[in-house]
Image: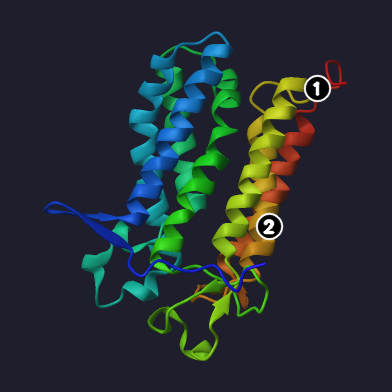
Amino acid sequence: MIAAIPSPSTGSFGLGPLEIRGYGVMIALGVIVAVSWAQRRWVDKGGTADHISTIAIWAVPAGLLGSRLYHVVTDWKRFRGRWEDVPAVWQGGLGIPGGLAAGVIVGLLIARRQGISMPRVLDAIVPTLPIAQAIGRGGNWFNQELYGRPTDLPWGLSIDVGHRPAAHLTAETFHPTFLYEGLWNLTLAAVLVRVDRRGVLKPGRLIGLWVCGYGLGRLWVESLRIDHASLLAGVRVNIWVSLVAVVVGGAVAVAGRNYRDAS
């Protein structure tokens, strides 16, 4: 049992004349791991590693751009009077739903241009995406952001006073919601791999299970968060998005059930 999970004293470190930000390092590491694993999975399915490299060259920047745009659009009030900070992704603020949508769409378009099977390459890539998400969430730890409400649990996250919300200045430890989401995504990746191996779903339908699973996890994680967020009918926008993901993703997965081959 530990008293609390400590937070880094700073979100960056020096490397010679360069300032390396932990947030960026975790995002980059997540991309590298996901692309490397996707290459191996696609090779196992009869493709080539170069196919995945070409897709990643276009899909990764599209995903980052989509993530930032989603964050800015859904939380635009925070940028009033400082629109010059919109490109400052190192400060945090990447909306995962927007990034996933943009990255997947662009990736599929590139796959089509290469003349490869879009459903099959999608099944190869999809389980690697929650891994990238899980690693990337570590960036929130460096920035001391996106944590949940105060908690006395032994795995509570210690947050510096300067990073605490005004309503909870006296609280010292908070739910590490980014860690919860990361662990959920690791579990989801394992489930996706097992489902893919068993042939439970028709080609290209694994994405439905991923979207549904991510939405379910994000629902309970989002309910713990206390950071500022845009509301719709008094409910956080990301909760509405998660509900849509559960319904749409679940429908895609159920409709793609491979009754003949599943055991």
Which residue corresponds to the image point at 45% horizontal and 19% vertical from the top-left?
A: 112
Earlier-in-chain disc, 1 versus 2 = 2
Are the residues flagged by discs 1 and 2 in contact, CB closer than 8 Å? no
Coordinates of residue 6 in the picture (x, y in percent): 49, 69
Residue 202, quarter of picture: top right
Q: Residue at x 42, y 38 (%)?
A: 31
Q: Residues within 10 Å of mark 1 (few under 14, many from 20)?
A: some
Q: Position of residue 19 (x, y in %)?
A: 20, 56
Foreground residue among 93 and 160: 160
Above or below for 234 versus 19: below
Q: Secondary structure at mark 2?
A: helix
Identity of the residue drawn at 28% across and 62% down: 86
Amino acid type assigned to the residue bearing label 1 in the image: Asn
Q: Is residue 15 left or right of residue 258?
A: left
Residue 85 is at least partly visible in this image? yes
The C terminus: image quadrant:
top right
